[in-house]
Image (cartoon, rainbow, N blue to C red):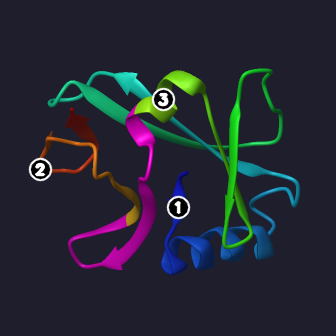
Amino acid sequence: MIFISDKAKEKVEALRAEGTLATDSFLRVSVVGGGCSGLSYKLDFDNESKPKDQVFEDKGIKVVTDLKSFLYLCNTTLEFSDGLNGKGFYFNNPNASRTCGCGESFAV
């Protein structure tokens, strides 16, 4: 399962209310090679499912990932921060053995 924090849910709903996102769009989360720790998160909004997608829903927000990425993302929570130290979505991943300073890459 991939979870959504309350603040992340509020931000996704705000983007939908602004008309920035289509009402049928969902979050597509994946892991790609790269970054200073070896693996990086990728977050997009999408409206097309692929045959081997893993589909989850938390707090009314649909989250989709490919099977390979799910192996790294199991039990991860998508968070949102609007604080002074940075604004945006980020991941709280219990599977990561280390993360970089910016929080955009990790290692297992």
Answer above or below: position of 79 versus 56: below
Q: Is 46 above or below relative to 36?
A: below
Inspect the magenta stretch and tell me whether residue 70 lies in it. no
Q: Label 2 sits on what residue type? A: Gly
Q: Position of residue 35 (x, y in %)?
A: 23, 28
- 98 or 85: nearer the eye? 98
> Can you give x and y, in whole percent of width and height, for residue 14 in the image?
68, 76
Circle 3 is placed at which residue position? 69
Please report the residue visible at 49 percent of the width from the left and 73 percent of the height from the top: 5
**Earlier residue among tags 1 and 3:** 1
| Label of residue 101 in the image | 2
Kind of residue sitting beneath label 3: Ser
Q: CA distance from mark 1 to mark 2?
A: 23 Å
Residue at 53% of width from left, 71% of height from top? 8
Instruction: Find residue 3 and name its label.
Output: 1
Q: Which residues are magenta?
A: 72-87
- Residue 85 drawn in magenta: yes
The answer to the question of whether label 1 and label 2 lie on touching residues, with beta carbons closer than 8 A, is no
